[in-house]
Image (cartoon, rainbow, N blue to C red):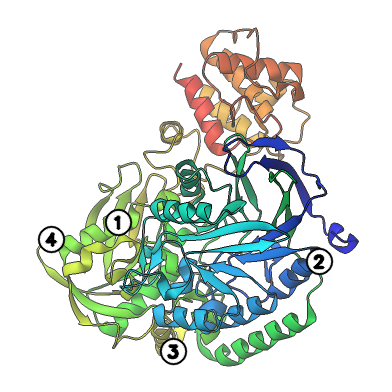
Amino acid sequence: MNKTVRSLGIALLAVGLAIPAWSGSISSVRAEASGGPSVSLLYFNDGHEISPVTDKLGTRGGVARVKTLVDSVAGEKIVAFGGDLGGGTLFGGVFKGHPMVEALGRIPVDVANFGQHDFDAGVPNTLELIKHSRFRWISTNLAGSDGKPFGQVPEYVVIEKQGIRIGILGLTSAMETTMRDERVKSLNVIESAQKAVDKLKQAKVDLIVALTQEPVADDKALLAAVPDIRAVFTEEEAEEKSFVHEVDGGSRLIFSPQGNMGSIIRLIVNKETDGTIRLSHEILKVDETVQEDKPLADMAADYQAKLDAELGKKVATLGGDLPYGDHHESRFRETAIGNWIADAYRDYYGTDIAFANGGGIRASAKKGDFTLKDTKSILPFGNKIVKAEATGEMVLKALENGVSGVEKLAGGFLQVSGITYEYDADKPSGQRVRNVRIGGKPINNDAVYTLALSNYMFTGGDNYTMFAEAKPLVGAGEALTDFELLAAYASKLKQVHIEPEGRIVVKGFADVPSGHWAHAAVKGLTDAGVMSGAGEGRFAPNTGLSRKEAGEMVSKALAGEAQVPVWSELGLGGEDMAAPIVRQELALIAKWLYGKKTGKTLPAAAKSPFADDAAMPDGMKEAAAGLAQLGLVEGRQPNQYAPKEQATRAEFAHLVWNILSK
């Protein structure tokens, strides 16, 4: 790697694997060059935006910076794109992936897997993307209506560089999250992978890797079922950072780069003279420190100018901000912007009710001038809004389906118009919805209601299969897009003033439902007034809390009010009370609460179960050991307490509730 790239703050993850081909025996080694032939496999995905993305997380991505980093890697290399270059955002919705196909060809990319969003504009558009690509698309498990690989792309590729033969699979699940079309079918991922791996072994490859578009949990299941796959390059888990998951004690790996092309995973493959394959890897950050490749930067600027010219027209004035939500509120509770969108659909068709799926809302709207660009930013997918007749029973099933995934912030959550409902996150999935009213009257299971909703949902997307027997009144062929209906409604209103108005009432916390590991603790402490939510329907279990908040909550748990000087009694009154409480401090405050609540002293553990307790001061170490001996506290990983990491609200609730329940 040259000095320019080294200065970018690239974090070398010192993981190396020696892999004897097909022996099943894998040993761990240091990540260092062996002197044999070497190939780099460079992987990135989530290419909705051709230009860099700038938001509260900083600046990342952009095809011009990706090319700079790819060019900076010396030696032989294979460049792989993991999918999602269309849909999902304003840019993707307007241009439907075609600029990204052009840009990836100029990087150049060698091989690409399909993401679900690559089908958002329909199968004909996906076929056009394939046709105009200068790189190879692959798919191991997507088939056309004839049962053959979709788009006549290969099931896999074998790329040989420096005498190293690498077999690459392409696997895509969750196709129900894009436009349904019988011309593309998703076959079983694991079965498809195993069949392809059997063929690759016959081809005598040195290494098999998979490019996947599926959750990491499914990637782990894939590795467990297909042991010949050594590494998986999967979809993004977060916008702010990359992830490397070690499987089988680190002998096999799952790589997840940042969203919006925020990083590139580099897998370095060395082949020893005895045929052993040695792997190491690093993460290359695609941020503002990377200089842009000028030709691709100019190309991106040209497309941005076209976008601005196309969508810069004002259509209305907003009287206030309409936030989508920093925490994806449109996926678990009523939002003003969700109301506005659903109202637009119902107004156009004059239906009894309208549904808008929260996952389709992708941006906020700011007070002031509202343009076509704003409408397309909010609704980038271009779904057709259809009109149908549905029974009350179908509507109830749809509402239940909508709230079945609130704990996962699933996109199928329903924003509504003409209908109100409550749901209780403490209830099991399928039993959460109650008090449904249409036009102010209780819903009638046997009555027939007119309904406006996206063709995506009407044809079964996000598991809305209950509309299979509903009667279509205006089909997708005659319908306008969600973007067009919102723009028309905004233009009709001219001045837009809308607020949440109680259409959806949330009981409990959507992010700590009945199956959550801290559910009993959170419910018990919030019912007792010791803790409170972080807004309607949200507890924020994975966020931290300050020392001040922790002290006040422990005091309330003990005395019913926040007056006991907990930190002073612990001799830490001089600490910064606004700072986040870390896990070793949580152990200390829990020890104090245990003593006050039970009148007992924690047992003096002969040995701590945590391998990292040497990093803790003695008092905190003893507290963690004693709590663990009583089964009151657990590590974050086996044998690891993580003493310096911030304690979460869920961890705090769980520990305090365990003590109060003693």
Residue under label 2? 72
Q: Nearer the viewer, mark 2 or mark 4?
A: 2
Q: Quick one: SS at disc 2?
A: helix
Q: Nearer the viewer, mark 4 or mark 1?
A: 1
Q: Amino acid at mark 2?
A: Ser
Determine the CA span between mark 1 and mark 3.
33 Å
Q: Nearer the viewer, mark 1 or mark 2?
A: 2
Q: Which mark is residue 491?
A: 3
Q: Nearer the viewer, mark 2 or mark 3?
A: 2
Residue sitting farthest toward the left: 446
Total count of labels: 4
Crowd class of label 3 (few under 14; some 14 to 19; many from 20; radius 10 Å): some
Q: Nearer the viewer, mark 3 or mark 4?
A: 4
Residue under label 4? 445
Q: Quick one: SS at disc 4?
A: loop
Q: Nearer the viewer, residue 235 or 391?
A: 235
Q: Nearer the viewer, residue 579 or 213?
A: 213
Crowd class of label 1 (few under 14; some 14 to 19; many from 20; radius 10 Å): many
Determine the CA span between mark 2 and mark 3.
49 Å
